[in-house]
Image (spheres, grey):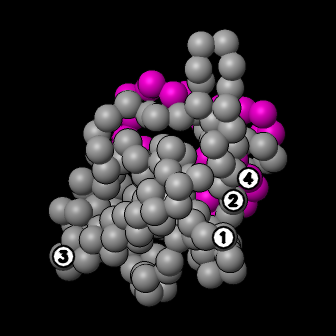
Amino acid sequence: MNTIATPFSSVDLTALIEAIGLSTADDAMNNTLTREQWSLLSSFLLPVSLPAGQVLFAQGTSDRTLYLVESGSLSVHAEREDQRLRLAMVGAGSVVGEGAFFSHRPRSATVQASTACKLWSLTGLRFSELANRQPTVALQLAMAAGAVLAKRLANRRRRVAAT
């Protein structure tokens, strides 16, 4: 019997899918994936739990990881000399890290948990593996994350909050 082994076992993304479906935020992610596609994607994602106050990533760091937000809220802020300027709040049903994910450039802002958060991470390397093994799923996810980025860039107030 020929089977394709996946690097990680499948995990339950039901709460993430529900958060995406229920989000009414301007920058919410659209769910364009079927249940079967979510199941295929799940083996490429890793869970991340953040307590309130913990920094997810800092402005200027070089990392392409994309994070899907299942629960909680995150503060996006810019570091300027000796001050912090809050740019946006990101909640369940959206993503963070989309700017560096697409641009391959350093993070443009710092993201910190405002409340306890559950996220799902997808590194650049894991996305490449996903694209090779499940190109349709990778394309759908990239388009959904790209739509969030486009929404943020179209909103003057949140334009600088693309992370």
Query: Alpha-carbon distance for marks 4 and 1?
Result: 12 Å
Q: Quadrant of residue 75?
A: top right
Q: Amino acid at mark 1?
A: Ala
- Locate residue 40, reporting x and y percent: 39, 73
Q: Are marks 2 and 4 in contact (CB under 8 Å)?
A: yes
Crowd class of label 2 (few under 14; some 14 to 19; many from 20; radius 10 Å): many
Crowd class of label 4 (few under 14; some 14 to 19; many from 20; radius 10 Å): many
Q: Nearer the viewer, mark 1 or mark 3?
A: 1
Residue at the image position 81 percent from the left and 47 percent from the top: 115
Q: Which residue occupies the foreground of this view, 123 or 159?
A: 159
N-terminal-most mark, 4 or 1 = 1
| Image position of 51 with respect to 128: above or below | above
Q: Are marks 3 and 2 in contact (CB under 8 Å)?
A: no
Query: Alpha-carbon distance for marks 3 and 2?
Result: 41 Å
Crowd class of label 3 (few under 14; some 14 to 19; many from 20; radius 10 Å): few
Would you say 47 lies left or right of 42 here? right
Question: Which residue lies under the disc numbered 2?
Answer: 91
